[in-house]
Amino acid sequence: MRATALAFCLVALCAGCNRGPDRGITGSGLQGNFSNPTNILGKPSVRVVSQTPASIQFRYNTTYVNLNEVTGAAQQYCSSSKKNAELQKDGATQENGQSIDYVRIALFRCVN
């Protein structure tokens, strides 16, 4: 009975889990730029945080994704409007006032 209850709880918890690459990555056709778009648990290791015609911003885990891959995706995104990607910011994220070095935010502007 206890094992059944535990199994039910795990299934219920995982039902809400986000599995597979980020929809912003797949929806924009950018997944080919990443060798590991998901982590070992199947969750996204890179996400599109925001995108406008003039910019795109990614949040990525450096354990699975490197800046070259993110830059390639940004260049592909900007190329659709015949522009070049220019890195504006790449920095560690902050949580509760603490810097998390392995999770980074990269902002690119699409420039002529």
Image (cartoon, rainbow, N blue to C red):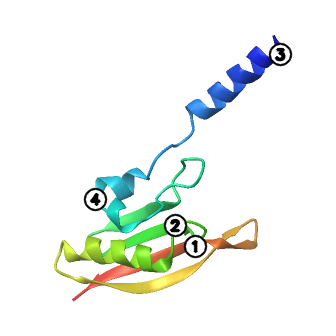
Tell me the residue that label 4 is attached to.
29
Marks 1 and 4, Cα distance to the nearest angstrom?
21 Å
Tell me the residue that label 1 is attached to.
104
Query: Which image quadrant is residue 112 in?
Result: bottom left
Residue type beneath disc 3 = Arg
Q: Residues within 10 Å of mark 4 (few under 14, many from 20)?
A: few
x and y, in percent, of residue 97 in the image: 76, 71
Q: Sequence order check: which comes first, mark 2 or mark 4?
A: 4
Q: Sequence order check: which comes first, mark 1 or mark 2?
A: 2
- Please report contact status of discs 1 and 2: CB closer than 8 Å, yes or no: yes
Disc number at residue 112?
none
x and y, in percent, of residue 54 in the image: 29, 76
Residue appearing at x 59%, y 52% in the figure: 40
Q: Is residue 32 left or right of residue 9?
A: left
Q: Residues within 10 Å of mark 2 (few under 14, many from 20)?
A: many
Residue type beneath disc 4 = Gly
Q: Sequence order check: which comes first, mark 3 or mark 4?
A: 3
x and y, in percent, of residue 65 in the image: 51, 69
Q: Secondary structure at mark 4?
A: loop
Marks 3 and 2, Cα distance to the nearest angstrom?
39 Å
Judging depth in this view, the residue of 12 and 39 nearest the camera is: 39
Q: Secondary structure at mark 1?
A: strand
Nearer the observer: mark 1 or 4; the answer is 4
Disc number at residue 2?
3
- Residue 43, placed above or below residue 30: above
Q: Quick one: which residue is furthest to the left in this view?
A: 82
x and y, in percent, of residue 98 in the image: 76, 72
- Please report contact status of discs 3 and 4: CB closer than 8 Å, yes or no: no
